[in-house]
Image (cartoon, rainbow, N blue to C red):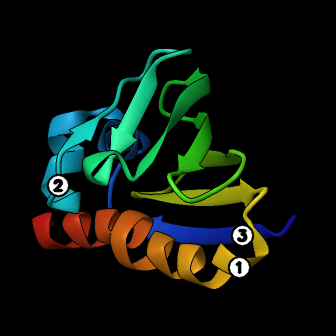
Amino acid sequence: MPTITQTYEMNAKPEEVFEALVNPDIIQHWSGDEAKMSADVGAKFSLWGGQMFGTNLEVIPNRKIVQEWCYEQWEKPSKVTFTIKAKGDISIVSLYHEGVPEKSLESIAEGWDSYYLGAIREMFNEEK
């Protein structure tokens, strides 16, 4: 199955990026929708009214999050890895999304940029 790889520069410290990925209040701010999320390994999450949901597989605070991601229309889950690295006063966030169904590849890649990591980057740009 196809893989999506994207990299984002964020005007924030790794701790701030990590919080934007795991704190449901911050997620609701940048996504504009209800979020259930935690930084606990094994915790279940859901986003956008439950359209996207999954489980935290690995969490290294401020550095890495690995999640099983499901979309209500997919036959089986995919796997998402976020890696956060400091670079001076900014953070480099790398996304590796494996197991994306071929028919969803383009829309999911655009979604990361428009509604998820791109939205987080915009939130940090507005705050600075």
C-alpha span from label 3 to label 1:
13 Å
In the rendered structure, which amino acid carries the disc numbered 3? Ile
Please determine whether, in this image, residue 45 is positioned above or below residue 29: above
- First of labels 1, 2 by sequence position: 2
Cα distance, mark 3 to mark 2? 24 Å
Q: Which residue type carries mark 2?
A: Asp
In the picture of the structure, the residue carrying the numbered disc 3 is: 4
Residue on which the image places disc 2 = 33
Q: Amino acid at mark 1?
A: Lys
Viewer-closest of 46 and 4: 46
In the rendered image of this protein, does residue 79 appear above or below residue 65?
below
Q: Which residue is mark 1?
A: 103
Nearer to us: label 1 or label 2: 1
Residue 121 location, quadrant: bottom left
Q: Which residue is found at the position 74% from the left and 67% from the top?
A: 101
- Residue at 43% in and 43% down: 14
Q: Please tell me how crowded label 3 is: few (under 14), some (14-19), or many (20+) other residues with Cα within 10 Å.
A: some
Residue 19 sits above or below residue 96 on the image: above
Query: x, y percentage for residue 77?
Result: 68, 45
- Secondary element under disc 3, as helix, strand or loop, is strand
